[in-house]
Image (tube, rainbow, N blue to C red):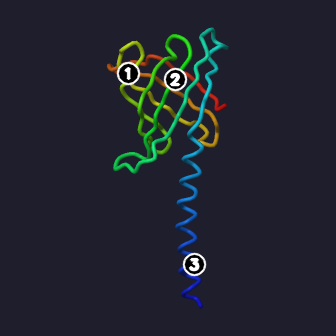
Amino acid sequence: MKKSRLISAALLSVTLSFAQAGLSQSLVDGNYVSDGAENGTGKCTLSITSFEQKHKYGDDTFDLESSGDGACEWTAIGVSKNYVITAGLVTSGGTAAFVMLSFPFGPAGKRVELIAFDVDGSIRNKEAFSKI
C-alpha cells in the first residue's frame, strides 16, 4: 500500500509542476497597452504570442508585435529566461535594434516594462505597458 501511495504522490507532483509551467506561460501571452498618452506620446499596443516549441536555450520564444503611431510600429522575435524577454532584429523603419521586456511583478502582475536599445547599446526608448 505504501508503494502505491509513493508512486501516486510522485506522479501528482510531476503533473502539478507541468500544470504550473503551462499556467505561467499563458499569463505572459496577450495584448498590452502603453501609458504613452499621459506623457505626450501616442499609445502603443504590444502583442505577445508564444511559440509552442521546445528550445535548447532559454525558456520560451515569443513573437512581439507593437502597433500604433510612429515609433510604436515594430516586430521582433524574443527568447525569455525567467520571464525577462530579450528580442533582436526589431523592424522599425528598417533599423535594427534590441528590446528587453521585464515583468516587475512577475507574469501574473499584468505589467510589462520595455527598454529598446540601439545596436551600439545606447537606450532608444523606455515604455511601460499594462495588460488589457
Amino acid on which the number 1 mark rests in the picture: Ala
Q: Residue at x 37, y 21 (%)?
A: 97
Q: Identify whether 90 is placed above or below 4.
A: above
Q: Residue furthest bottom?
A: 1
Question: Could you tell whether 34 is left or right of 53 in the image?
Answer: right
Q: Residue furthest top?
A: 40
Q: Which residue is mark 1?
A: 97
Q: Which residue is mark 2?
A: 66
Foreground tag (1 vs 2): 2
Q: Residue at x 41, y 39 (%)?
A: 79
Q: Quadrant of residue 86?
A: top left
- SS for tag 2? strand
Task: Give the crowd class for mark 2: few <14, some 14-19, many >=20 residues within 10 Å.
Answer: many
Circles 3 and 2, Cβ within 8 Å, touching? The answer is no
Circles 1 and 2, Cβ within 8 Å, touching? The answer is no
User: Along the line of sight, which residue is nearer the eye, 1 or 39?
Assistant: 1
User: Along the line of sight, which residue is nearer the eye, 94 or 85?
Assistant: 94
Circle number at residue 37: none
Circle number at residue 8: 3
